């Protein structure tokens, strides 16, 4: 039975609860229903096409309906769709772990699988905490994170979050974090906190180079390397949340590579499977892995797991995605596109209601302000960012804002023509919404 667009819209509004969405607003308008896609293009149930300007929430890498990834999943389906990793291994998960270790920053040697970015970070926090408890650092129970941090939506990852709009309501459920000073002031303000409290601190968690959900906030050059040195000096575990910035988004495979940093734990998700299937991984060092080895009765086991840990279908997709990176020299070919995008963004800086344009590779944030001179922000309830994104749909572009920050993060496969059209549409829509 084929459903009409109207039938699907009715069913959605009757039964579905959408993430990060005020459902009162959602129910007021018929939703856009996506039916298919190809490359950097999405297609709705009426046949209208849109440039996927945010990679289907920052995860699609090589495009929709990529034949090699499609075939890898089909081939794995002919073998087995899923078997547990509790007491068993499987072929794709084993091969993927070896490949991830090979391409990751040197020193990360072990892979723990999960389902999404929140769980990858949750695992990193639990591993860091338990490692300290089992290696003599019983007083190390706290974590430091940055202002406007976002590391996911599970309770542990929310505990190290710093966005009140998302996190404040859950505060009674959370463990206490130590907020870091803004990175714009350099490493010294954070060093003062660490020197006073290093015996309490198990780990410091950061999104390297660019804080995504916090509003596309760029990290000052050199801060990441200084943070690595600070953590080493004080025997604090460094956790790199590469969920959004990994797999080419910053122009390198991993953002940590820009400053030759190896964290103690690194969380991966989103682009790991090419944007096809839920899959996440937490990578760590041999030192941390060995801290969990012991006789059965010592209970040093990491008592954590997920039903679909290391799912063979998702791991097969990830292997195919990484093979595309290698075969097509994706990162090498990305550099001219990053430069083209930077050129396209120059004119945004002259708009009277654009206060800041941040770019790190294919990650872009365009911050809307009421007054460029004073940098006065709009009241977020006026929905300027949302209105811009609603308007771009009429011109064949799908994007999603972070409050009044317009986000562009297209798939790495986007063509030069599409990479000109995308910012062109956004530019016109920003002018229409802010200069009325």
Image (tube, grey):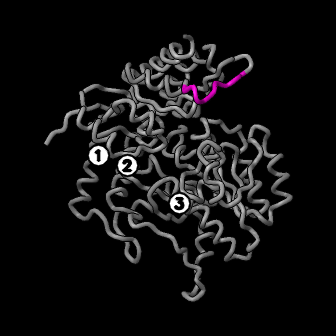
Q: Residue at x 54, y 27 (%)?
A: 383
The residue singled out by tag 3 in the image is: 282
Q: Residues within 10 Å of mark 1 (few under 14, many from 20)?
A: some
Q: Is residue 133 magenta?
A: no
Q: Quadrant of the C terminus?
A: top right
The local secondary structure at tag 2 comes to: helix
Q: Which mark is residue 323?
A: 2
Q: Are marks 2 and 3 in contact (CB under 8 Å)?
A: no
The residue singled out by tag 1 in the image is: 68
Quarter of the figure with residue 357:
top right
Q: Is residue 343 above or below residue 72?
A: above
Cα–Cα span, label 1 and label 3: 25 Å
The local secondary structure at tag 3 comes to: strand
Q: In terms of depth relative to the viewer, which is nearer, 397 or 33?
A: 33
Q: In terms of depth relative to the viewer, which is nearer, 210 or 22?
A: 22
Q: Residue furthest top?
A: 436
Q: Is residue 206 above or below residue 29?
A: below
Left or right for 262, reference 274: right
Q: Residues within 10 Å of mark 2 (few under 14, many from 20)?
A: some
> Which region shows up in magenta?
375-383
Q: Are marks 1 and 2 in contact (CB under 8 Å)?
A: yes
Q: Main secondary structure of the magenta part?
A: loop
Tell me which numbered mark, 1 or 2, is placed earlier along the sequence: 1
Image depth: mark 1 or mark 2 in front? 1
Q: Is residue 353 above or below residue 80?
A: above
The local secondary structure at tag 1 comes to: helix
Cα–Cα span, label 1 and label 2: 9 Å
Quarter of the figure with residue 197:
bottom right
């Amino acid at each position: 039975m084929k459903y009409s667009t109207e039938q699907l819209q009715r069913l959605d509004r009757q039964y579905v609860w959408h993430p990060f969405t005020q459902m009162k607003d959602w129910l007021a308008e018929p939703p856009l229903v996506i039916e298919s896609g190809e490359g950097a293009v999405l297609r709705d149930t009426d046949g209208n096409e849109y440039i996927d300007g945010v990679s289907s929430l920052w995860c699609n890498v090589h495009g929709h309906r990529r034949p090699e990834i499609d075939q890898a999943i089909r081939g794995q389906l002919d073998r087995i769709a899923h078997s547990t990793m509790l007491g068993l291994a499987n072929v794709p998960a084993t091969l993927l772990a070896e490949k991830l270790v090979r391409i990751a920053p040197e020193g990360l040697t072990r892979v723990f699988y999960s389902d999404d970015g929140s769980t990858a970070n949750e695992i990193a926090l639990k591993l860091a905490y338990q490692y300290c408890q089992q290696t003599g650092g019983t007083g190390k129970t706290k974590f430091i994170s940055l202002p406007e941090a976002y590391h996911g939506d599970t309770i542990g990852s929310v505990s190290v979050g710093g966005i009140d709009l998302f996190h404040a309501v859950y505060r009674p459920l959370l463990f206490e974090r130590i907020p870091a000073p803004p990175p714009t002031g350099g490493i010294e303000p954070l060093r003062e906190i660490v020197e006073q409290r290093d015996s309490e601190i198990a780990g410091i968690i950061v999104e390297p180079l660019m804080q995504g959900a916090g509003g596309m906030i760029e990290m000052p050059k050199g801060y990441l390397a200084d943070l690595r040195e600070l953590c080493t000096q004080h025997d604090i575990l460094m956790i790199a949340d590469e969920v959004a910035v990994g797999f080419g988004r910053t122009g390198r495979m991993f953002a940590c590579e820009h400053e030759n940093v190896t964290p103690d734990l690194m969380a991966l998700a989103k682009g790991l499977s090419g944007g096809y299937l839920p899959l996440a991984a937490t990578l760590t060092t041999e030192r941390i892995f060995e801290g969990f080895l012991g006789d059965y009765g010592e209970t040093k086991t990491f008592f954590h797991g997920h039903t679909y840990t290391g799912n063979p279908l998702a791991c097969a997709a990830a292997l195919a995605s990484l093979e595309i990176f290698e075969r097509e020299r994706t990162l090498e070919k990305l550099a001219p596109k990053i430069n083209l995008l930077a050129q396209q963004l120059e004119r945004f800086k002259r708009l009277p209601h654009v206060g800041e344009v941040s770019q790190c590779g294919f990650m872009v944030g365009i911050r809307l302000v009421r007054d460029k001179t004073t940098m006065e922000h709009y009241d977020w309830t006026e929905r300027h960012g949302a209105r811009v994104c609603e308007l771009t749909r009429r011109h064949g572009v799908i994007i999603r804002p972070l409050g009044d920050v317009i986000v562009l993060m297209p798939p790495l496969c986007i063509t030069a023509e599409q990479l000109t059209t995308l910012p062109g549409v956004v530019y016109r829509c920003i002018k229409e919404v802010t200069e009325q």
